[in-house]
Amino acid sequence: MIKIVPTTPYPDQKPGTSGLRKKVPQFQQKNYAENFIQSIFDSLEGFDNKILVIGGDGRYYNREVIQIAIKMAAANGFGKVMVGRGGILSTPAASNLIRKYGAFGGIILSASHNPGGPTEDFGIKYNASNGGPASEKITDAIYARTKVIDSYRICDDPDISLDVPGIKHVDEMEVAVVDPVEDYAALMETLFDFPAIKTMIQSGFRVAFDAMSAVTGPYAKEILENRLGAAKGSVKNFMPLPDFGGHHPDPNLVHARALYDEMMGPDAPDFGAASDGDGDRNLIIGKGIFVTPSDSVAMLAANAHLAPGYAAGLAGIARSMPTSGAADRVAEKLGIGMYETPTGWKFFGNLLDAGMVTICGEESAGTGSSHVREKDGLWAVLLWLNILAVRNESVKDIVTKHWAAFGRNYYSRHDYEEVDSDAANGLVDNLRDQLATLPGKKFGELVVQTADDFAYIDPVDHSVSKNQGIRILFEGGSRVVFRLSGTGTSGATLRVYIERYEPDASRHDLDTQEALADLIAVADEIAEITKRTGRLKPSVIT
Ligand code: G6P
Ligand code: ZN
C-alpha cells in the first residue's frame, strides 16, 4: 500500500561533483535518504511506467537505502526497477543497464573512492536516460526541492530479497533482480579482442588486478580470470566488503601501495591495475612504471584503433581542464576535435551524446568512452590489455615511445586534505584577486603568460559553468591550476595541479617532483599555501 509520509527539509542536501555525499550517520537521520530520493523524483517528469535502474557499490548502508529506493519508486509510479543482485552494480555497469534497457534513469548508491563503514561515507546520485550523471539543471532542481519538501511517497511492502535473481513485485511494480556482471561483460566483449588478450595471457603474460574489496571484484574475476584466462588469484581483494576492509578504495599510489610495490619489485607481473569503490576509476601500472591518468588517456586515444570497438577511429577527445595536455597532442596529430571541460564526468555527456568525442579522461583516474556515460575502470584495463596484445610490447616501451613521439607532460597533483574551509576559500579568493595583475610577472625563470578562473561554455547546449578552477599559465606551456575538491565530506580539500611540457626525449626520465620543483615553489608563493593553511606539505601527492 502506498503511504504519504510528512517530512521536514534538511538544509544540507546540495549535490556535489557527483551526487549527494555525506557520512553514514547523516544519512541515517530520520527521512534523510527519503527526502533526497523524493526530491529526485519530484524533479523529473514522465517516468510513469518506465524503468528505473538501482544499484550501488556495496558499501555500508547500501542495502537499506536500496530497499527504501525500490519502495519509493513503486509508490511514485515507476513501472519497473532493475536492481543488481545483492544490491551491487558498478557505476559503469549501471550506466550500461540504463542505456541497454532504455530505462528512464538510475539511482546509484556510492561515495566512489571514499571510505565506507558505519561512520564513513555514503552517497546517492541520479543518472539520466543517457546513462550519465544528471546535468546541473537537474541537480539544481533536486537541491531546490530538498529545501521545501514536506512529504514523500513509499510503499509499506516488506523488503524484497535481493540475493536471488528473478522477477519480484512491490505493490504493482515489477522488480527484476539481475546479474550485475552479465550485461557489462557482454558489452566488453563487443569492444575488445578477447581472443587476442587470451592468447597473450596464455603465452605467459601476467596480470595483477586489485579490486580493493570494492565493487569491481566480481566483474574482474569473471572477465579477467574466467573469460580471459588470467591465473586464479590474479584478481586480489575481490570480495566487495561494506567497509572495503577498512581501506580507502581509491586506486592511487598511496592507497594501492601494495600493488605499486609489487609492480616495482623484482618479480613484477607484466601489468598491474586497480579500480575504486564503485568501479569507475582506474590505476594502470606497468612493470617498473606507473602511468599517470593524464598520460593514460593520451596513450589509449593514440592506440584505440587497435581495438575492434574503435577500429574506425575516434570522433574527438575530451579532458577535464586540470588534466594534462598530453591528450591534446594526440588529438592534434589525429586531426580530431579536442575539448577541455570542467572537472566532473557529467560535462562529457553532451559531447558524447552529440557524437563529438569518443574518448574522455580526467586526471582523477577516470577514463572512458562513448560505450557508456560514466568513466569505466575495467574498460581502461581492457583497452590497455588489447593494445598490449596487438603491439606485443611492454607498458614501459609503449609509454617511452609515446613520450618520444609526442613529448612528455610532467604532471603531479598535490592535495591538501581537511583544510579549514574558511582558509581554503580565502586562498582561492586571494588568487582570484591576483588574476589581473599576474600576467607578465616573473618568478625566477618562469614568466606568467595568462591567468584566469576557468569558465566553460558547453558547445552543445551553450550552458555556462563559471569558477571552475584558477589557471596560471607560464610562457613555454607550463602551468599551475588550483581548485577546491567537490567530493570531500569534511573540511575543504585544496588541489594543486602542476604541469610542465618537455619535448626533449633525453630529458624524459627525470623524477617528476624534481622536474616540477620550480613550479611547485611558485605555486606556494602565489597562493600562500603554507601561510594560509598551516600545512608544510601536501597530504597526498599523485
Ligand atoms: C568524481 C567525478 C569525477 C571528478 C572527480 C573530481 O570522481 O566523478 O568526474 O573528476 O570527482 O573530484 P574532486 O574531489 O577533485 O572534485
Ligand atoms: Zn568512483
Image: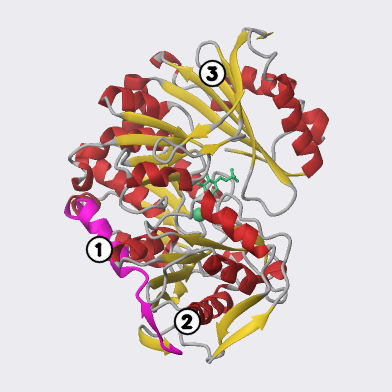
| Image coordinates for residue 508, horizontal then vertical, percent | 44, 20
- Residue at position x 21%, y 37% from top? 313
Residue highlighted by disc 1: 186
The kind of secondary structure element at disc 2 is: helix
- Residue at position x 80%, y 37% from top? 423
* Spatial separation of the CA atoms under disc 3 and disc 1: 42 Å
| Image coordinates for residue 44, horizontal then vertical, percent | 49, 64
Q: Closer to the camera, 471 or 308?
A: 471
Amino acid bearing label 1: Ala
Residue highlighted by disc 3: 478
Amino acid bearing label 2: Ala
Say if 422 sits above or below 379 in the image: above
Q: Earlier in the sequence, mark 3 or mark 1?
A: 1
172 displayed left or right of 304: right
Q: Are marks 2 and 3 in contact (CB under 8 Å)?
A: no
Q: Closer to the camera, 191 or 149?
A: 149
**Residue 401 visible in the displayed image:** no
Residue stretch rendered in magenta on the structure? 170-195
